[in-house]
Image (cartoon, helix red, strand yellow):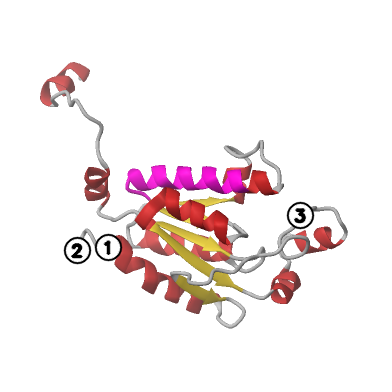
Amino acid sequence: MTDNLLHIHPVFDRMLGRAAKEEKLRQHAAVFWLTGLSGSGKSTLAIALENALFELGYLTQILDGDNIRSGINNNLGFSEDDRRENIRRIAEVARLFVQCGVITINSFVSPTRAMRQQAREIIGDDFYEIYVNAPLEVCEERDVKGLYKKARRGEIPNFTGIHQPYEAPTHPDLEINTAQQDLQTSLHLLLEFVLPIIRKKTQ
């Protein structure tokens, strides 16, 4: 069987490029970088977006604290230097997914404009900054994981919004206010933004 396959398919002397993979997947890859305070709704929106795109036939990958901090970045803490390195590595991983034609949905606080600019420079024109906007008091009231309570008790140092400032984007590609809009409305706005981008080379 293997011999027959080798006979049928010629030996190629170069790696497959992004365009070939996007054509196979019938999609245009991009990185949608959701930024905002903990509790703003980034992860909820990322999961909702992934499920909606999956139903439409798109291949996606979510990158978030759960799969990044437990793996490739498990040697990093929460100092300023470690946070910068965290974002740098995430951006490099996202860039590799884009090169493979995969739509990548990133959900990270990424608290400073400089960090997000670094990510934009690494990823390039395929980087889209989406500001998931909810004021601190709303995020702290939600506190789904109890992180704000722990931060207030001093159990989590350098927590963004409590000990460290969050620098909101000044010109995001899209802003979604989850304090004013429910999940269905927020997802609708997100899909309206995302779909023309991921379709633009396949229509």
Across and down, in percent, residue 26 comes to 25, 54
Between label 1 and label 3, give the one nearer the viewer. Answer: 3
Query: Which residue, given by chain and number where applicable, does mark 1 sit on?
Result: 199
Q: Residue 129: within the magenta? A: no
The answer to whether mark 1 and mark 2 are in CB contact below 8 A is yes
Is 63 positioned to the left or the right of 143 in the image? left
Q: Secondary structure at mark 2?
A: loop
Q: Which of the 4 image quarters holds residue 85?
A: top right
- Number of disc labels: 3
The magenta region covers 84-102
* Residue at the spot 59% in from the left edge and 57% down from the top edge: 110
Q: Secondary structure at mark 3?
A: loop
Give the residue furthest to the right. 153
The answer to whether mark 1 and mark 3 are in CB contact below 8 A is no
Give the residue furthest to the top. 3
Query: Which residue, given by chain and number where applicable, does mark 3 sit on?
Result: 158
Assign the N terminus to one quadrant of the image: top left
* Residue at the spot 62% in from the left edge and 60% down from the top edge: 111
Magenta stretch mostly in which secondary structure? helix
Is 195 positioned to the left or the right of 111 in the image? left
* Residue at the spot 84% in from the left edge and 53% down from the top edge: 155
Q: Which amino acid, mark 3?
A: Asn
Q: Which amino acid, mark 2?
A: Gln
Give the residue furthest to the front. 114
Viewer-side residue, 116 vs 48: 116
Q: Which of the 4 image quarters holds residue 151?
A: bottom right
Across and down, in percent, residue 41 comes to 60, 67
Q: What crowding class fits label 2: few (fewer than 14 Cα within 10 Å), some (14-19), or many (20 or more)? A: few
